[in-house]
């Protein structure tokens, strides 16, 4: 396979944990193609030397494969010398036929880049890349917290405490105080004083649920789990506060995203960190959905559409969107109506996934236009009148436009 060159000078980087193999492919003074290959280490001084070596060729294109998380440090080093590298998907590289077995990975990347056959993936700006550390750690801590809460419920059930049968949330304020009272040695009758009057369960039902056989081992394990839960909640609160503080310049976008049913402030912040605030990087909502991996699979042959698997995409975006879709399905909105329509035909999981797809497309439009979400099933004019009518009437009476 003959590849037609488009660029005169390109550089390709094969990234490993502790080694960077860099291939420069360029035309000489007589038009002959020259190849130079250098290897650099993985430490800071090596990355700096690599970036300076690459910049010395004044390349038109610089490409590297997205190898795990190892591409991020070399990418940042290239940014510091004014080079915006293309981070390409290794899967796309493997689909191009014609590779010879004696060509090194970096040289093959350079050949493909010189022929214009590689397309860079989405890389957010530096500030959003740093904020991703906060957002993704926050997701990880939230998952750990959910696991610990489930474990607390399991140990309580093992000790004969059936509090979850009469209380909707055993991690609410009343339920947690009652559990702490039991661990402190108080009797079920004594811990009833912590029960809120808003609980639907009667005192008899609460007493039956709190009667159990907690051993010394149960109490020790429960106290440790509860302590860990409260520690995690404190850490999550710190991460949320720091994330919102760093996103203060994007406060307007966050407010707009919160108008979408199912998206709260933290969900909007985490989603914004992942996709950025410049939708021109994706071009259209469909490409954003494909990048995130929430679009339907496309498998059509001979005019027949077959079941297609979804792409892997960005798992963090998909997790946030599915959580928002679950919340939106319980609201009174057009999104909830779409969920109900899909639920009958496609089942709950596919309906949630389709709703996540729709929410992401709405997010694209809101960020692109700098606008907020208007639901088709909500009469905003009626809401405004209901909210402001008493004040309007009071002022009209005050200035004599209507009789007092």
Image (cartoon, rainbow, N blue to C red):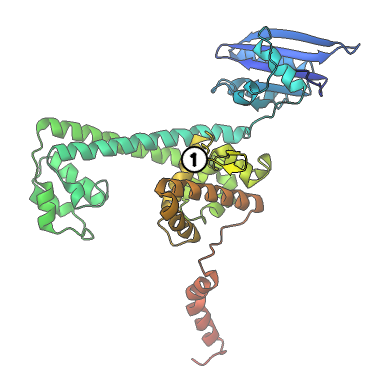
Mark yes or no: residue 23 visible.
yes
Q: Residue furthest front?
A: 302
Tell me: residue 388, above or below residue 92: below
Relative depth, front residue between 41 and 343: 343
- Left or right: residue 95 compared with residue 321: right
Residue 208 locus on image (x, y percent): 9, 51
Q: Residue furthest right?
A: 30
Residue 289 locus on image (x, y percent): 58, 42
Category of crowding for the residue at label 1, using alpha-carbon neighbours closer than 10 angstroms: few (below 14), some (14–19), many (at least 20):
many
Residue visible at 42% across and 45% down?
A: 349
- Left or right: residue 383 compared with residue 219: right
Q: Residue furthest bottom?
A: 403
Judging by the rendered image, the residue that carries numbered circle 1 is: 318
Tell me: residue 168, above or below residue 333: above
- Left or right: residue 327 compared with residue 254: left
> Considering the image in quadrants, where does the N terminus appear?
top right
Relative depth, front residue between 143 and 294: 294
Mark yes or no: residue 77 visible.
no
Residue 81 locus on image (x, y percent): 72, 22
Toward which corner of the image does residue 28 lie, by quadrant?
top right
Residue visible at 55% across and 32% down?
A: 130
Residue 275 locus on image (x, y percent): 58, 40
User: How many marks on residues?
Assistant: 1
Residue visible at 79% across and 16% down?
A: 57
Residue visible at 56% across and 45% down?
A: 248
Relative depth, front residue between 268 and 394: 268
At mark 1, the secondary structure is helix
């Amino acid at each position: 396979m003959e590849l037609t060159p488009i660029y005169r000078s390109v550089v390709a980087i094969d990234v490993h944990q502790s080694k960077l193999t860099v291939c420069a492919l360029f035309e000489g003074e007589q038009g002959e193609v020259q190849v130079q290959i250098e290897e650099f280490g993985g430490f800071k001084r090596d990355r700096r030397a690599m970036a300076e070596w690459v910049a010395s060729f004044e390349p038109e294109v610089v490409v590297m494969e997205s190898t795990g998380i190892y591409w991020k440090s070399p990418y940042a080093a290239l940014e510091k010398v004014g080079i915006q590298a293309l981070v390409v998907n290794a899967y796309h590289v493997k689909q191009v036929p014609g590779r010879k077995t004696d060509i090194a990975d970096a040289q093959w990347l350079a050949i493909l880049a010189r022929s214009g056959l590689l397309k860079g993936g989405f890389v957010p700006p530096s500030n959003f890349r740093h904020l991703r550390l906060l957002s993704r750690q926050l997701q990880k801590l939230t998952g750990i917290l959910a696991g610990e809460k489930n474990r607390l419920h399991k140990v309580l059930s093992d000790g004969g405490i059936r509090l979850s049968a009469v209380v909707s949330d055993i991690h609410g304020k009343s339920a947690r105080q009652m559990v702490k009272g039991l661990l402190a040695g108080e009797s079920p009758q004594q811990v009833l004083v912590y029960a809120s009057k808003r609980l639907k369960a009667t005192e008899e039902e609460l007493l039956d649920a709190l009667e159990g056989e907690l051993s010394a081992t149960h109490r020790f394990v429960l106290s440790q789990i509860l302590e860990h839960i409260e520690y995690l909640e404190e850490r999550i609160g710190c991460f949320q506060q720091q994330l919102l503080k760093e996103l203060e310049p994007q406060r307007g976008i966050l407010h707009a995203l919160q108008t979408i049913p199912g998206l709260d402030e933290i969900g909007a912040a985490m989603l914004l960190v992942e996709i950025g605030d410049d939708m021109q990087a994706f071009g259209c909502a469909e490409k954003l959905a494909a990048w995130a991996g929430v679009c339907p699979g496309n498998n059509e042959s001979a005019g027949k559409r077959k079941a297609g698997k979804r792409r892997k995409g960005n798992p963090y975006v998909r997790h946030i969107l599915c959580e928002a879709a679950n919340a939106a399905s319980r609201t009174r909105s057009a999104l909830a109506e779409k969920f109900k329509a899909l639920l009958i035909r496609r089942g709950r999981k596919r309906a949630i996934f389709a709703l996540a797809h729709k929410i992401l497309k709405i997010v694209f439009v809101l960020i692109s236009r700098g606008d907020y979400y208007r639901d088709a099933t909500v009469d905003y004019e009626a809401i405004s009148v209901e909210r402001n009518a008493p004040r309007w009437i009071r002022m009209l009476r005050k200035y004599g436009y209507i009789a007092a």
